[in-house]
Image: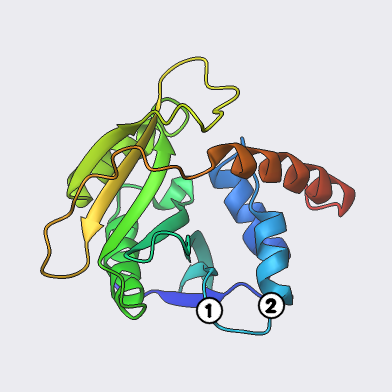
Amino acid sequence: MILRYEKISKDNIVMASRIQYKIFPNSSAYLKYLNEIQRETSDLPINFLVFENDIPIGVVGLYDMPEYSDTIWLSWFGVLENYRFKGYGSQIFKDIIEKAKQYNKDFLRLFTYEVWNHDAQQFYKKHMQMEEYYTNENDDQYDIKEGKCKIFGYSLCDKPIDYWNNKFIDIASEDKDHEKSMELMKKDGII
């Protein structure tokens, strides 16, 4: 299976945002996509709309946190429901690992929510090399009433993956950005 990865741009941001929102109806990456488009560099973050032929099937992205120089993070990785359980997610994961290696980081990680992203948990357990709960007391996970945040990891080099051990990742600011992003999507007529 050969997939095409189109960097999110002003020409496809509406389509990418609608697909991302369809996959993740509780949150929005629109504001992140807008900020990325306005940057003039090819550095991280980078986000892609994924196509099979000319049909958009999902989204995927990579970003980093400068304070953790050994890690690159997987973001907004999702496949539209009609394309799930057909190998697309596995292929996107393999392809994004190759893209991640270009940034010379040791580890690929992602955070997800045990309940909200329940369906993706089995995929991550199969494809990632480690998982752990994230319970940093300084990170206000304000509306998680059930379940916990999890971090999954994958080694991009010959070093074995190490545990994240609750290092601060600032989920609270991510959640605030999602709220602003949802409002902006409504204002711009995307949803």
Mark 1 nearby-residue class (10 Å; few <14, some 14–19, many ≥20) = few
Residue under numbered circle 2:
39
Residue 165 located left or right of residue 83 = left
Q: Residue at x 21, y 51 (%)?
A: 127
Is residue 100 found left or right of 139 in the rendered image? Answer: left
Colour scheme shown: rainbow
Number of callouts in the render? 2
Q: Residue at x 42, y 25 (%)?
A: 115
The answer to whether the residue labelled 1 contacts the one labelled 2, judged by CB atoms less than 8 Å apart, is: yes
* Residue 53 seen in the current view: no
Label 1 is placed on what type of residue?
Answer: Asp
Q: Give how far across and how far down residue 106 sits, in percent.
A: 25, 67
Residue at position x 85%, y 52% in the image: 189
Does residue 174 appear in this view? yes
| Element type at mark 1 | loop
- Determine which quarter of the picture holds residue 135: top left
Relative to 12, 170 lies left or right = left
Q: Amino acid at mark 2?
A: Arg
Disc 1: which residue? 43
Q: Residue furthest right?
A: 187
Compared to residue 38, the image places residue 184 above or below, namely above
At which x and y percent is residue 1?
Answer: 29, 72
Q: Any mark on residue 88, and which?
A: none
* CA gap, disc 1 and disc 2: 9 Å
